[in-house]
Image (cartoon, helix red, strand yellow):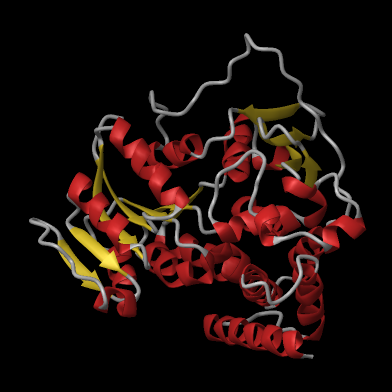
Amino acid sequence: MTRSKNIAVLGSTGSIGQSALEVVRALPNLNVLAISGHRNLEKLVDQAREFSPQFLVAADPEAAKAFEFPRLPGTEILIGPDQLERIASLPEVDTVLAAIVGVAGLPSTWAAVASGKTVALANKETLVVAGHLMTEMADRSGARILPVDSEHSAVFQALKSGTRAEVGRIVLTASGGPFRDFDSNQMKCVTVEQALAHPTWEMGQKITIDSATMMNKTLEVIEAKWLFGLKPEQIEVVIHPQSIVHSLVEFVDGSTIAQLSPPDMKLPIQYALTYPDRVLGPSPRLDLTQAMKLEFYPPDVDRFPALELGFEVVKFGGSTGAVLNAANEAAVAAFLNQEISFTDIVTACREILDQHHYEPHPTLSQLIAADRWARQEISKWMIA
């Protein structure tokens, strides 16, 4: 990198945010201008002591009220979710790492895109819920949305081998989670502890459960449509247990380009933060002196019905993404609280999606209303 970049790490206390700060430690040209957290304020303060950001945002007012902030020279402490939008819009911010989990990350990502920022997007829900609005906004503002998900980063890198018109299809890889070999009876008895034990990735609770149901891949299918302007028939999913091949792009002549690396999020994060440069960083290297095997299997949609929901949303668009995402967030929270079973998560999402009033061209306010409705319907579904 030939110049310094000021970055705002929104969601710095989560798994993606912490990995991003590991990258920053290794790259002196990245300057942390702002960090934010929700409830883990002790970690947020520790990060502020190390990186000396100009701004620290405690997004949860109740958590902030109960927390005694120490003196942090040179760092201004801001309270409340609206401050995230302010930070994302600051003129001195070059890149916003959008790593807030769930639809909670939508307003700040929206603000960053509206301000024409480079957005390193780890918050896939933003495009799942409002992909058509977000991409239109980026076109108007000149914002650049760079993928942080390992699968979409892999596609983004592989696309450098040809033009968009030459793309036949993309193939998103999925680890299959901890239950790729479970039968339907075993799936019904899955516990929270089992679902949180991912075999290859270390992630937050919500995304780990999404990986176990394969809803995470469902959301990534939808995200891919908006990131790369693809048709439903141009997106496929394959199970790859080793998580070494992160995704593939097949061009119209039959040539397939894949991106490989160990399962570690620092590499896609670094590529988004330093783009268009590639620099030496802290990511582990693929050791080809050791014997290994790379396996690929078609997904079993009978055991993992979440995948079908993703392709429906890609096909119909409109309000479907907002409803599916909200229903899933609420259902996952209920499962983590042991209020519903593991298999109930996708079942509930299916029913709520089928029941909702479809709006083909929703406004942002209509999407927010659809999100609220879906969450309420999950609560009703649990009682019924």
Residue 375: x %, y % from top left: 63, 83
Q: Which one is nearer the viewer's eye here, 61 or 162? A: 61
**Which residue is at 65% across, 12% downward?**
290
158 lies left or right of 24 = right
Residue 305 in sight: no
76 lies left or right of 282 = left
Relative to 18, say whether 297 is above or below.
above
Relative to 374, say whether 150 is above or below.
above
Residue 13 appears in which quarter of the rendering? Answer: bottom left
Relative to 225, say whether 377 is above or below.
below
Residue 30 appears in which quarter of the rendering? Answer: top left
**Which residue is at 43% across, 64% downward?**
109
Q: Which one is nearer the viewer's eye here, 17 or 234? A: 17
Q: Which one is nearer the viewer's eye here, 342 or 75? A: 342
Residue 214 appears in which quarter of the rendering? Answer: bottom right
Q: Which one is nearer the viewer's eye here, 365 or 245? A: 245
Count the numbered circles shown: 0
Q: In which quadrant of the rendered image does the C terminus lie? A: bottom right
**Which residue is at 75% across, 67% downward?**
313
Residue 60: x %, y % from top left: 35, 74
Residue 329: x %, y % from top left: 62, 71
Q: In which quadrant of the rendered image does the N terminus lie? A: top left
* Residue at the farthest top position: 289
Relative to 261, say whether 181 is above or below.
below
Residue 180 in sight: yes
**Which residue is at 46% across, 49% downward?**
16
342 lies left or right of 289 = right
125 lies left or right of 343 = left
Residue 57: x %, y % from top left: 27, 66
